[in-house]
Every structure is written in structure tokens, then in C-alpha cells.
Image (spheres, rainbow, N blue to C red):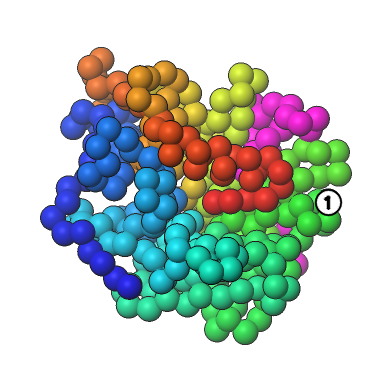
């Protein structure tokens, strides 16, 4: 079903002036589904090269795409709820649904024109969640193990970093070159980012300085997106328990992303222009909310004192957020 909410402008939670994070050199703007009253409960999970943004909205458990003209399109392949987890460079939307009758998870890919959905279940019969898709239609996701699904849907290839514990490799993104990015849990409990080569012959480990001990490991990092130039976008947790976004260039240069006014910045995707999307959680606020953001590199704006981020989290948004984070801690990535 394709339904368009026409004529809705981008809802901003900052002033009209862009805000610059001095540490990373990014300007920030929010993107959330409008008409949510006092609550914004969504996260931006991916951005295409043309600027289409995939969104999860916890207020109604539906997925949306914010189109380049500012309108919003519902993303639901005819099931109870839908969770878009990413978007390809050319606009294909990937995600998963929960079937109202069985309660089971199914992956899906929506075509770039929005005209068709491909729903699928991994051959092992486990709950299937798709996290990344490239312009060729190749999908990465998670069932009982991580998988790479061919564009025709006929072949599933297991993804497992040799340095990981069994079933502790989580594939979360894929670029148009076929490189896969995600994270793995080592036998000592530490988490590390991995990049898998397009042919699957090699895995490279990436660690982010400043990631601290967590659950007995040496650091918590979760890379969630990769573009064609090899930039990796993700997040890490510091000694205070706060999550920060980062972009790591192919040459190893790392830039930190912190949405002004928030103590948590989560990053979910990056396009080939280097634009990053994610979600921000506030350091304080009366009506606490989760709000999606777009971070654009190379900004020169100076933040104004009156334009600091005012954030909070509503009850439904908090529940969705805790559900996602709890899934990560238990070894099952929710989004």
C-alpha cells in the first residue's frame, strides 16, 4: 500500500539557522514525521544520494520516507507494523515487519519507485530482519545468523567474522561496491566494527579511540552504515555511558558527531555525499522525546545561543528506544 501525506513541511526542532558541531564540522537539521503533537518519537535510519530519508516512527509503529519535496510516504508492506532500517543510494527501502497473525519477523525491500514490496524469510526459518540494501538489491540482515541475500532472492550467504564468537556477527550495512559493515562480539565480550570485502574473502577490524569498557569488554562500537568511498558511520559509548556518533574515513580519519544539546547521538546511515542520519536523545527536558536528524558535512555556520536543541522523550518513544537498546545488549539487533 502506498499512501502519501502531501504538503507537509519538514518539522524542525532547532532554529532555522544550521548548527555547527565544532568537533566534527557538521550542521544539523531535524527530520520527523509531522503532526505528532507534543511528542516526536522517530529516528532517521537512512538517507539516499538524492536526500530521501527513511524514518521509523514509534508513535504509530509505521515506517515513512521523507521525499525530496518534503512530503512523506508511508512504508508498509501490508503487515501489522513496519520498521524501515535503511535506504540505498538510489532509494530502495529495506527493513522488517511484524506479521499480525503469526507475530513473526519478515524482511522486506521496497522498490525505489515505491510501487512494489519484496517480503522474505531467511531459509533457516528464524525471525528475519533486514538492515541494509544497495542499489543492486543485495540485502544484509539477521536471522539465526547474519546473512547476505542476493538481488534475486535465491541465494543466502552466511556472514561471520572469524574473530567473533559463534552467532555474534551482526551485518548492518552494505554499499554499492558490495562491502559489508557491522559489528561482532569477540570471545572476551568486547565489540568491534568489521568491514567485509565484497567477495567475502577478508574481514577487517576497526576500533574507535575513546570507546570504553562495557559488559566486561574493551569497548562498545556499532558501525551502522558505509558509503561507496568507504566512510563508516556509527556510534561509540564513552566512560559516562553516553553514545556519540562518528564518521571514519577510508584513511582512518575519525570525526565525532554530537547533536548540540543532547547527551546521546546515534548514527544509522551515511550517503555518498557524506550526509549522516540518526537520532538524538536529550540531556534534559520536560517532555522527553527522540528526534531524527540529518548531519551535513562542511558547514561554516556558527551556532546561535538561542538555537540550542530542545529535546525530550515521550513514553511511547522511550519504550521503542529501550526495546531497541535492550535488543542490542542481548545480542539481537532490533534496528
Residue 62: tell me if it is visible.
yes
The vertical placement of 95 against 264, above or below, is: below
Q: Dot 1 surroundings within 10 Å: few (below 14), some, or many (20 or more)? A: some
- Assess whether residue 97 is covered by the magenta stretch: no
Q: Position of residue 97 (x, y in %)?
A: 50, 63
Q: Nearer the viewer, residue 299 or 269?
A: 269
Quadrant where the N terminus lies?
bottom left
The vertical placement of 31 against 53, above or below, is: above
Q: Quadrant of residue 150?
A: bottom right
Which residues are the magenta region? 199-222
Q: Nearer the viewer, residue 146 or 22?
A: 146
Q: Residue at position x 66%, y 29% from top?
A: 211
- Assess whether residue 211 is covered by the magenta stretch: yes
Main SS, magenta residues = loop
Q: Quadrant of residue 2?
A: bottom left
Q: Which residue is mark 1?
A: 165
Q: Is residue 294 left or right of residue 236?
A: left
Q: Position of residue 165 (x, y in %)?
A: 83, 51
Residue at the outermost right position: 187
Name the element at disc 1.
loop
Residue 251: tell me if it is visible.
no
Q: Residue at position x 68%, y 40% from top?
A: 329
Q: Position of residue 179 (x, y in %)?
A: 60, 62
Amino acid at each position: 500500500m502506498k499512501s502519501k501525506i502531501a504538503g507537509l513541511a519538514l518539522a524542525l526542532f532547532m532554529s532555522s539557522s544550521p548548527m555547527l558541531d565544532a568537533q566534527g564540522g557538521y550542521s544539523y537539521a531535524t527530520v520527523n514525521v509531522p503532526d505528532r503533537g507534543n511528542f516526536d518519537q522517530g529516528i532517521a535510519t537512512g538517507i539516499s544520494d538524492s536526500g530521501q530519508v527513511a524514518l521509523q516512527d514509534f508513535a504509530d509503529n509505521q515506517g515513512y520516507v521523507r521525499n525530496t519535496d518534503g512530503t512523506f510516504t508511508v512504508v508498509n508492506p501490508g503487515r501489522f507494523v513496519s520498521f524501515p532500517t535503511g535506504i540505498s543510494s538510489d532509494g530502495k527501502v529495506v527493513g522488517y515487519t511484524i506479521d499480525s497473525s503469526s507475530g513473526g519477523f519478515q524482511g522486506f525491500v521496497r522498490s525505489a519507485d515505491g510501487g512494489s514490496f519484496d517480503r522474505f524469510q531467511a531459509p533457516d526459518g528464524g525471525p528475519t530482519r533486514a538492515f541494509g540494501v544497495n542499489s543492486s538489491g543485495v540485502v544484509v540482515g539477521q536471522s539465526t545468523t547474519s546473512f547476505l541475500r542476493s538481488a534475486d532472492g535465491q541465494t543466502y550467504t552466511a556472514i561471520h567474522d572469524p574473530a567473533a564468537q559463534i552467532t555474534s556477527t551482526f551485518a548492518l550495512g552494505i554499499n554499492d561496491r558490495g562491502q559489508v559493515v557491522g559489528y561482532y562480539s569477540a570471545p572476551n565480550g568486547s565489540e568491534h566494527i568489521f568491514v567485509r570485502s565484497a567477495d567475502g574473502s577478508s574481514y577487517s577490524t576497526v576500533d574507535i579511540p575513546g570507546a570504553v569498557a562495557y559488559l566486561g569488554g574493551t569497548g562498545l562500537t556499532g558501525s551502522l552504515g558505509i558509503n561507496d568511498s568507504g566512510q563508516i558511520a556509527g556510534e561509540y559509548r564513552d566512560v559516562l555511558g553516553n553514545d556519540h556518533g562518528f564518521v571514519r574515513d577510508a584513511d582512518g580519519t575519525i570525526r565525532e558527531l554530537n547533536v548540540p544539546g543532547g547527551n546521546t547521538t546515534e548514527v544509522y546511515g551515511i550517503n555518498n555525499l557524506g550526509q549522516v542520519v540518526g537520532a538524538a536523545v536529550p540531556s534534559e527536558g520536560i517532555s522527553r522525546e527522540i528526534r531524527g536528524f540529518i548531519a551535513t558535512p562542511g558547514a561554516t555556520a556558527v551556532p546561535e545561543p538561542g538555537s540550542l536543541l530542545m529535546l525530550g522523550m515521550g513514553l511511547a518513544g522511550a519504550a521503542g528506544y529501550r526495546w531497541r537498546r535492550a535488543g542490542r545488549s542481548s545480542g539481537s539487533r532490533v534496528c
